[in-house]
Image (spheres, rainbow, N blue to C red):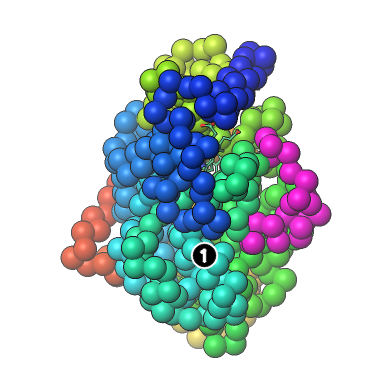
Amino acid sequence: MLDKRHVPVVLALILIVIVVSGCSQQKASVDKAAVTIPAGEKDPAIWGKAYPLQYESLMKTAEGGQGKSKYKGSDPIDKLSEYPFQLVLLDGWGFGVEFNEPRGHVLMLKDQLKIDPSRRKAGGVCLSCKTPYAPELKNQMGLNYFKEPYDVVHAKIPAKHSELGLSCIDCHDEKTMELKISRWSLNDALKSMGKDPTTLTHQEKRSLVCAQCHVTYSIKKDKDMKSVDLFYPWAKSKWGNITVEDIEAVIKSDPANYEWKNNVTGMKLGHIRHPEFELYSNGSTHWSAGVACADCHMPYERVGSSKISSHHVQSPLKTDMKACTQCHNQSPEWLRDRVIYIQDRTNNLMTRAGNAAAQAAKAIELANKTPNIDQNLLAQAKQLYEKAYYRVGFISAENSMGFHNPEEALRVLGDGLYYAEQSEKKSREALLKAGFTPPEKFDLELAKYNKRGTKGLTLKPELVKESTFDGEK
Ligand code: HEC
Ligand code: HEC
Ligand code: HEC
Ligand code: HEC
């Protein structure tokens, strides 16, 4: 199984040789030498003159559809109605107003411009993973890049590219075509955990180009809650072992990392976003076997007589597990079943832990309002809630529904469930001590938190009750 892994690499090398020597039959590769990509060129269409196959492939990321994916796919499905407990957990800022499943790369900036404006409130900093102009804007504007309102910084992008999403220059060097890290924030983060960003192997870069954006990040705030920095909270971690505990410790190390206030609990909190790289690289079976993000999301594909790395980055379930069968001898059906098996279990525990955290939040809300409450017990309930919040957030924001690292996903969720239940217990104890008998189960009052009203959020009440293991979403 393992030696098959090298076949595509060898084929790619052969392809590069053919491309460079200019003797390919493909219209794609002939004029490569004739087209020089200008330094700093952001327009993928210009790169596409030299590499039309990769360009056309990238443009396909505009396509929607769920294909054979059960939980993911490429439509902007509303996560708040999929997981209504999030309405309680996220009440108080943009995520609680609109929060969608991700879709294709060329749509990233368009989608950000379309989303509820409360999601862009942090300012220019929000553009960091949405436009190839971000590194340049940050260099030009310095602190103001983070601080200034989103619209002000967005207006500095040339009009013709005001909706341009991911581009070649985000991952490639325009002269050598080598993979390249373009985001300062990833270089800083690697250094913060003692990994030298100048000596990365090619296979590491096949994951790290993705880790520029598919990671959690924190936005530091000044005393007026204006954004002043963007960083990945890895300073207490080691390469290959970034844990939710280490991330939590970094967030807690500085009050400036507390980005928002939850209305239900009245607590200031940090936040964990899409930690695909962190979950995956934390000792998963595939990571330990040396498999990169690009192996599963950019498999080799034949276009005419050429073979390219698919730049139509998407769920491997949508291409009938072709990425997996580069290495695995099993049938696509068997492989898909394994993915769904893992995902159903993750989804089950995530829904349980999420609902438990929402119960804990409502218990704190009530305790906050109750006179003569034991402040010590309430403080303990809040500390436990914060732990639960980061753990539920870690796995619910991660985009593989556990597949990237099944064991670790279940461990984190198990801890999240435990902390949520302990938190609720402390609040109940405090309420009883203050002479108030809390209800057996708190009403989550979901309708109250649905801020979009007519924008079409439909709650699925069956998800609110504890999910039993029957797999259905
Ligand atoms: C998200 C990062 C990313 C973006 C954006 C991206 N590429 Fe790539 N590209 C890769 C990776 C990863 C490989 C595989 C490199 C390897 O293993 O040698 C690759 C490979 C290539 C290759 C080598 C041949 C092949 O297909 O493997 C070419 C040429 C190429 N890309 C051109 C482009 C062009 C042109 C664009 C823009 C239209 C682009 N790429 C955008 C990540 C990216
Ligand atoms: C510059 C930031 C950036 C880089 C680099 C990047 N991504 Fe993404 N990716 C995003 C954003 C943002 C979205 C969501 C876009 C949306 O929903 O509009 C996304 C979406 C996706 C999706 C979902 C696609 C779908 O159809 O639902 C996958 C899969 C993905 N990225 C994988 C990767 C992989 C693998 C790499 C590296 C080869 C990578 N990304 C590099 C920012 C990035
Ligand atoms: C061993 C194969 C494999 C590797 C390696 C891998 N992924 Fe995935 N990834 C998957 C599968 C399977 C899914 C679940 C897709 C689904 O449910 O449709 C997924 C889902 C995703 C999604 C959500 C896709 C969607 O449709 O919304 C993103 C984003 C993503 N992966 C990014 C990454 C990044 C970044 C890396 C590297 C840090 C990575 N993946 C490594 C197999 C892999
Ligand atoms: C680049 C090669 C490669 C790719 C691509 C790849 N795998 Fe694997 N996979 C491995 C290796 C190596 C192992 C380790 C076990 C072994 O050697 O059998 C493994 C193990 C597994 C296991 C067993 C996990 C465990 O914890 O024991 C499953 C399930 C699996 N892969 C599914 C998939 C699926 C689904 C995809 C596509 C989304 C995929 N793999 C893509 C190389 C790969």
Which residue is more in the foreground, 334 or 128? 128
- Residue shown at the point (31%, 36%) measured from the top left: 66
Q: What residue type is labelled 1?
A: Ala
The x, y position of residue 188, in whole percent, is: 70, 61
Which residue is more in the foreground, 236 or 391? 236
Judging by the rendered image, the residue that carries numbered circle 1 is: 134
Label 1: state its secondary structure: helix
Which residue is more in the foreground, 400 or 4? 4
Kindly tell me whether mark 1's CB lies below 8 Å from ligand 2.
yes
Instruction: Judge whether 404 appears above or below 448 on screen.
Output: above
From where the camera sits, is residue 339 visible? no
- Residue shown at the point (32%, 44%) measured from the top left: 62
- Residue shown at the point (76%, 50%) measured from the top left: 198
Q: In which quarter of the image is the N terminus?
A: top right
Instruction: Judge whether 8 appears above or below 112 on screen.
Output: above
Task: State the extent of the magenta-drawn residues as a range.
Answer: 184-204
Residue furthest front in the image: 34
- Residue shown at the point (38%, 20%) measured from the top left: 304
* Residue 472 on the magenta span: no
Residue furthest left in the image: 454
Q: Is 470 placed left or right of 64 in the picture?
A: right
The x, y position of residue 152, in whole percent, is: 41, 79
Q: Quadrant of the C terminus?
A: top left
